[in-house]
């Protein structure tokens, strides 16, 4: 009898072994399974804007296609878009960038991938506030570096500087700095940004700033850490069109950085996708030129949804701080179960409410579940009613 053995070489390269695959996919599969059984699910597990891409952005794509703007573009992005982005970040983020400091990428994910690849060597450590957006630990692992988690809650209570310092080692190379935060909705204020900037300068660290939710900040200002004195050269800032302009499926983002990082970002982009689809970039230009009144109007709609969900969760005994930014509520669900995976399973089975267990965002997320309020108010209300009946 012949046995089939797997050749030793049929093994994933070491570099990819410690890289995980999204846990959230499993939740999506379970939701699809329930729907296939004909059960209705109140969906709070997503991470997408509730509105469609604005018409003028879609029209710009159509016009670009009609005008045959379909050839290779420069791999760093079309000149018109890079100039508009440089204008936007100077004006709105106060980041002193020139056109040379701008690269267009396929969404925040590609920008962050490039940023971590540019900065981290194998064996380096990267400080990151926790809970954190799940893929970040995998992007750090992809660089064969080690994430070092710092609880946001503890840092805010005891002092950011002191808490970061406790985790500092001679191997610390960078800090991942996400504001507004996914999943907790924390927005670091100006004095917190100044503390982190001071810490980075004092210890010669690079800051990887993730500002995916820059336009979703309620009642306070969004501070780009690269705008602070002497921070531009040590900060790589990743932005995306996904959340601000409801363009998740378009895969469009941009990164702002000085040398040597920009050369690294150009390489990671060139040798992965060779740039971003040309007609999409013309749509991105229309997006960036959208009057800011659009963003203000959408923000109000998010705020209404936030208040509805967060007040409703608190009324159910699922204690939840009011998120200062992004579109997620992150209540304490230990009244359902102290383990967030079990709590999320109960919410789904008993109330058909789909959420993301907090543990997938790091140990500091345990005991919580993430609920997106980027959905119709009727859906939020129906989910709250279902939880009230069954919990
Ligand atoms: C914190 C954070 N950063 C970056 C991204 C990247 O988004 P995209 O790749 O769609 O631009 C996301 C998406 O959910 C996010 O939550």
Image (cartoon, rainbow, N blue to C red):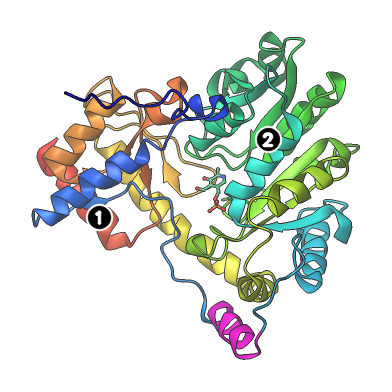
Q: Give the prevailing secondary structure in the magenta stretch.
A: helix
**What's the mark number on residue 381?**
1
Position of 150 with respect to 27 (left or right) is right
* Residue 2 x, y percent position in the rendering: 21, 25
Q: In this view, does 93 lie above or below 18?
A: below
Magenta-highlighted residues: 56-68
Which residue of the protein is positioned furthest toward the bottom in this rendering? 66
Q: Is residue 296 above or below residue 21?
A: below
Category of crowding for the residue at label 1, using alpha-carbon neighbours closer than 10 angstroms: few (below 14), some (14–19), many (at least 20): some
What kind of element bears circle 2?
A: helix
Q: Which of 248 and 12 is in front in this view?
A: 12
Position of 92 with respect to 242 (left or right) is right
Residue 327: tell me if it is visible. Answer: yes
Q: Is residue 83 above or below residue 45?
A: below
* Residue 261 x, y percent position in the rendering: 81, 41
Q: How far apart are marks 1 and 2 (CA)?
A: 40 Å
Pointer 2: what residue? 116
**What's the mark number on residue 277?**
none
Q: Is residue 67 magenta?
A: yes
CB within 8 Å, label 1 to label 2: no
Position of 18 with respect to 352 (left or right) is right
Q: Across the whole image, how many numbered discs are drawn on residues? A: 2
* Residue 206 x, y percent position in the rendering: 78, 30
Residue 305, image quadrant: bottom left
Which numbered disc, 1 or 2, marks the residue that appears first in the sequence? Answer: 2
* Residue 281 x, y percent position in the rendering: 66, 71
Rendered residue at 88%/43% (across/down): 259
Category of crowding for the residue at label 2, using alpha-carbon neighbours closer than 10 angstroms: few (below 14), some (14–19), many (at least 20): many
Rendered residue at 22%/52% (across/down): 42
What kind of element bears circle 1?
A: helix
Quarter of the picture containing the C terminus is top left
């Amino acid at each position: 009898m012949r046995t089939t053995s797997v050749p030793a070489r049929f093994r994933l390269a070491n570099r990819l072994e410690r890289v995980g695959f999204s846990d959230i996919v499993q939740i999506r599969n379970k939701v699809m399974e329930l729907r296939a059984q004909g059960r209705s699910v109140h969906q709070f597990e997503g991470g997408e804007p509730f509105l469609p891409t604005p018409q003028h952005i879609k029209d710009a794509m159509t016009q670009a296609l009609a005008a045959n703007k379909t050839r290779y573009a420069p791999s760093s992005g079309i000149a018109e878009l890079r100039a508009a982005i440089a204008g936007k970040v100077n004006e709105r983020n106060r980041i002193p960038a020139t056109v040379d400091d701008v690269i267009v990428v396929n969404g925040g994910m590609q920008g962050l991938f490039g940023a971590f690849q540019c900065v981290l060597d194998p064996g380096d450590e990267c400080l990151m506030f926790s809970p954190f957006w799940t893929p970040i630990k995998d992007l750090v692992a992809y660089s064969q570096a080690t994430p070092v988690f710092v609880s946001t809650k503890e840092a805010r209570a005891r002092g950011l500087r002191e808490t970061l310092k406790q985790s500092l080692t001679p191997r610390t190379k960078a800090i991942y700095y996400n504001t507004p935060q996914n999943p907790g909705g924390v927005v670091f204020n100006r004095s917190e940004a100044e503390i982190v900037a001071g810490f980075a300068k004092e210890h010669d660290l690079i800051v990887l700033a993730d500002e995916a939710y820059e336009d979703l900040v309620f009642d306070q200002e969004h501070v780009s850490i690269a705008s602070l004195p002497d921070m531009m050269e040590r900060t790589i800032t990743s932005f995306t069109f996904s959340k601000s302009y409801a363009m998740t499926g378009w895969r469009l983002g941009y990164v702002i950085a000085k040398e040597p990082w920009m050369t690294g970002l150009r390489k990671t982009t060139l040798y992965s996708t060779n740039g971003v689809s040309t007609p999409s970039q013309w749509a991105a230009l229309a997006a960036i030129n959208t009057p800011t009144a659009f963003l203000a109007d959408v923000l109000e709609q998010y705020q209404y949804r936030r208040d509805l969900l967060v007040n409703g969760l608190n009324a159910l005994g699922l204690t939840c701080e009011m998120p200062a930014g992004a579109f997620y509520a992150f209540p304490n669900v230990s009244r359902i179960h102290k383990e967030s995976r079990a709590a999320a399973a109960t919410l789904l089975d008993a109330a058909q409410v789909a959420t993301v267990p907090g543990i997938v965002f790091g140990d500091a997320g345990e005991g919580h579940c993430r609920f997106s309020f980027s959905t119709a108010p009727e859906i939020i209300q129906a989910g709250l009613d279902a939880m009230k009946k069954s919990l």
